[in-house]
Amino acid sequence: MIRPAMIEDTPTICRLIRALAEYERLAQEVVLDEARLREHLFGPRPFAEALLAEEEGAAVGFALFFHNYSTFLGRPGLYLEDLFVVPEHRGKGHGKALLSAVARLAIERGCGRLEWSVLDWNEPALRFYRALGARPVDGWTVYRLTGEALTAAANG
């Protein structure tokens, strides 16, 4: 079962984000604050949304996404920040159900595209996305500013 996350799901979403970070070998980078996540997902100005995959009443996966905008298409899009199913519940269709639910929301909202990033080494994820018909965007490299570099860029 796939359902929209609710405010009381915040601790569960935090747990799943930490599990994702562990899986991606990036646990040391998680500085997630539960109160801030609650505010960003369910506050007066939400920055993102989440869906949960449940099995027998327990959350076994999540998708977290937000709107972006394509100037070339002249339409909004959705960016899938995270799609994760705990390893012991993979192969049961939860990941596909989560991605399908996000894709349906994109279509319902008039979005021109749904995009996400995948770690180069994550071959199971790459196979999963290719099997769904997704293709990598050749010729583009993701860049990121964080911490001191972000502050320096903001200060010109």
Image (cartoon, rainbow, N blue to C red):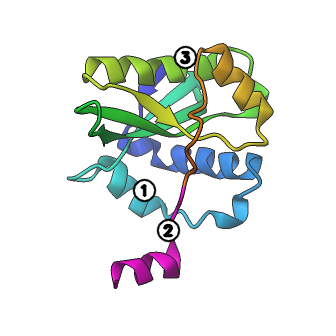
Residue shown at 35% from the left, 54% from the top:
40
- Estimate the x, y position of residue 146 in percent, counting from the top left: 51, 71
Disc ID at residue 114: none
Residue shown at 53% from the left, 62% from the top:
32
The image shows residue 141, relative to residue 114, as above or below, that is below
- Estimate the x, y position of residue 42 in percent, counting from the top left: 31, 48
> Badge 1, how many Cα within 10 Å: few under 14, some, many 20+?
some
SS category of the residue bearing label 3? helix
In the foreground, 140 or 25: 140
What type is the residue that disc 1 sits on? Leu
| Residue 57 makes an appearance in the image | no
Quarter holding the C terminus? bottom left
Residue 4 belongs to magenta span: no
Part of the protein shown in magenta? 143-156
The image shows residue 146, relative to residue 112, as above or below, that is below
Residue labelled with disc 2 = 145
In the foreground, 72 or 15: 72
Residue shown at 39% from the left, 27% from the top:
113
Camera-nearest label, 2 or 3: 2
Residue labelled with disc 3 = 97
Please report whichever mark, 3 or 1, sits nearer to the chain's N-terminal start: 1
In the foreground, 115 or 29: 115
Residue shown at 71% from the left, 59% from the top:
27
Q: Quadrant of residue 121?
A: top right
What type is the residue that disc 3 sits on? Ala
Inter-mark Cα distance, 1 to 2:
20 Å
Please report whichever mark, 1 or 2, sits nearer to the chain's N-terminal start: 1
Inter-mark Cα distance, 2 to 3:
32 Å
Disc ID at residue 37: 1
